[in-house]
Amino acid sequence: MFAILLVIHTPGEILSFCSNIQIAAGGHSQTGLEVLLKTWTETFEVIQGYSEIRYSVVALSRVFEYGVEGIMVKGDEITEPSKAGRIVTRSQRRHGIIFPNRG
């Protein structure tokens, strides 16, 4: 549902709404946006169905385009694609394209 909202509405409205919600968990408070993004990225691999995966990818890219910063999620940081098991194409190598770190 969150992904569909981010696709059909401007990300600013949805993200600011979620960031204004405070959730107390484990003795400390987090914003709704932090909880949502952590849960979303942790469960991304279990999303099934072409359109559901597509909506999720498009929505997540809109979140990053909007410029959400300072939220840490679980996972490995990929600094060099070839060392992380990702395929680097000849074009990427020729142009020196390196996948940016996203904190």
Image (spheres, rainbow, N blue to C red):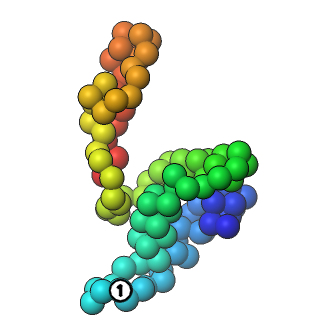
Q: Is residue 50 toward the left or the right of residue 78 in the image?
A: right
Looking at the image, residue 41 lies above or below residue 51: below
Q: Closer to the camera, 88 or 47?
A: 47
The answer, for residue 89, to whether it is visible in the render is yes
Residue 15 location (% of width, % of height): 53, 67
If the image is split into quadrants, where does the N terminus sit? bottom right
Report which quarter residue 17 is drawn in.
bottom right
Of the residues shown, which amino acid type is indicated by label 1? Ala
In percent of the image, x 36 and y 79: which residue is there? 30
Q: How many marks?
A: 1
Q: Closer to the camera, 86 or 66?
A: 86
Q: Closer to the camera, 68 or 43?
A: 43
Please name the residue that numbered disc 1 is placed on. 25
Residue 21 location (% of width, % of height): 48, 83
Residue 94 location (% of width, % of height): 37, 9
Q: Closer to the camera, 103 or 89?
A: 89
Report which quarter residue 10 is drawn in.
bottom right
Q: Is residue 76 toward the left or the right of residue 47 in the image?
A: left
In percent of the image, x 27 and y 90: which residue is there? 27
Classed neighbour count for the residue bearing mark 1: other residues with Cα under 10 Å, few (<14), some (14–19), many (≥20)? few
